[in-house]
Image (cartoon, rainbow, N blue to C red):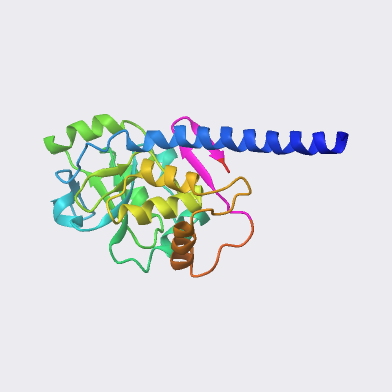
């Protein structure tokens, strides 16, 4: 009887813990849709040659994973970052997904330093002094963070998910290709995973096999970051 009670208690504690983690994860995911009403098509970007173009003219019809940064100690990740390099590699097969860095300041030394860094498959731009950029520049401040931009220029994920978010960043970026915002994608993923950290949603299993080219094995590695912290399932 005592063994049975201990087993039941362990199951209850595991279930309760899983529910708490999922609840916290969903709370973090809510940060992703902070700016889903904002469209950045009119942002004016300047390339390394000084040529200025709008986001719309450069990336219309593309899903953009965009790092915005301001201070040199907080450079966006490059080829020395294994998580970011792996993320880029997994999305090479999608010709409608692009990776860019946007420098949100006018310090020439920092800008040149960024251009020296190896970052295969990533285009670097500087946010121009055009007045069309003022509100976005103020919004971002000194933050170094990734955004996911939809094909129509809408911010689908704000301040995350990051390359270290493993399964989630892949799912959110892939779902953004069809216009899904990051919060909805994150919650769908979290809801579709059971207490053993396996898929319980057949559609997620199907997505995994198509995206990764293999069946999910063992426990899934899932983490989620946001402005309030980071948790893993």
Relative to 67, residue 87 above or below = below
Is residue 34 in sight in this rendering? Answer: yes
Which residues are drawn in magenta? 219-231
Relative to 132, residue 121 above or below = below
Considering the image in quadrants, where does the C terminus appear? Answer: top right
Residue at 58% across, 51% down: 221
Residue at 43% across, 55% down: 170
Q: Nearer the viewer, residue 187 or 28?
A: 187
Is residue 51 in sight in this rendering? Answer: no
Magenta-span inclusion, residue 217: no
Residue at 32% across, 45% down: 181
Q: Is residue 99 left or right of residue 153?
A: right
Q: Nearer the viewer, residue 194 or 78?
A: 194
Relative to 189, residue 18 above or below = above
Q: Is residue 129 left or right of residue 98?
A: left
Q: Which residue is at the far front?
A: 1
Magenta-span inclusion, residue 221: yes
């Amino acid at each position: 009887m005592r063994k049975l009670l201990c087993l039941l208690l362990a199951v209850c504690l595991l279930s309760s813990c899983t529910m708490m983690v999922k609840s916290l994860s969903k709370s973090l995911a809510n940060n992703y849709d902070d700016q889903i009403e904002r469209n950045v098509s009119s942002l004016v970007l300047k390339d390394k040659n000084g040529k200025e173009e709008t986001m719309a003219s450069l990336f219309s019809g593309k899903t953009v994973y965009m790092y915005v940064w301001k201070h040199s100690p907080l450079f966006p990740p490059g080829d020395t970052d294994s998580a970011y390099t792996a993320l880029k590699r997994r999305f090479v097969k999608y010709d409608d997904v692009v990776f860019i860095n946007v420098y949100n300041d006018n310090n020439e030394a920092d800008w040149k330093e960024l251009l020296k860094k190896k970052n295969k498959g990533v285009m670097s731009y500087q946010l121009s002094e055009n007045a069309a950029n003022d509100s976005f520049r103020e919004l971002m401040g000194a933050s170094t963070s990734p955004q996911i931009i939809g094909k129509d220029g809408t911010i689908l994920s704000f301040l995350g998910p990051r390359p270290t978010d493993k399964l989630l960043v892949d799912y959110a970026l892939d779902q953004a290709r069809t216009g899904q915002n990051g919060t909805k994608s994150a919650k769908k993923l979290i809801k579709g995973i059971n207490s053993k950290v396996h898929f319980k949603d057949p559609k997620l299993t199907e997505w995994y096999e198509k995206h990764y080219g293999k069946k999910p094995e063992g426990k899934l590695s899932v983490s989620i970051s946001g402005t309030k912290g980071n948790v893993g399932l």
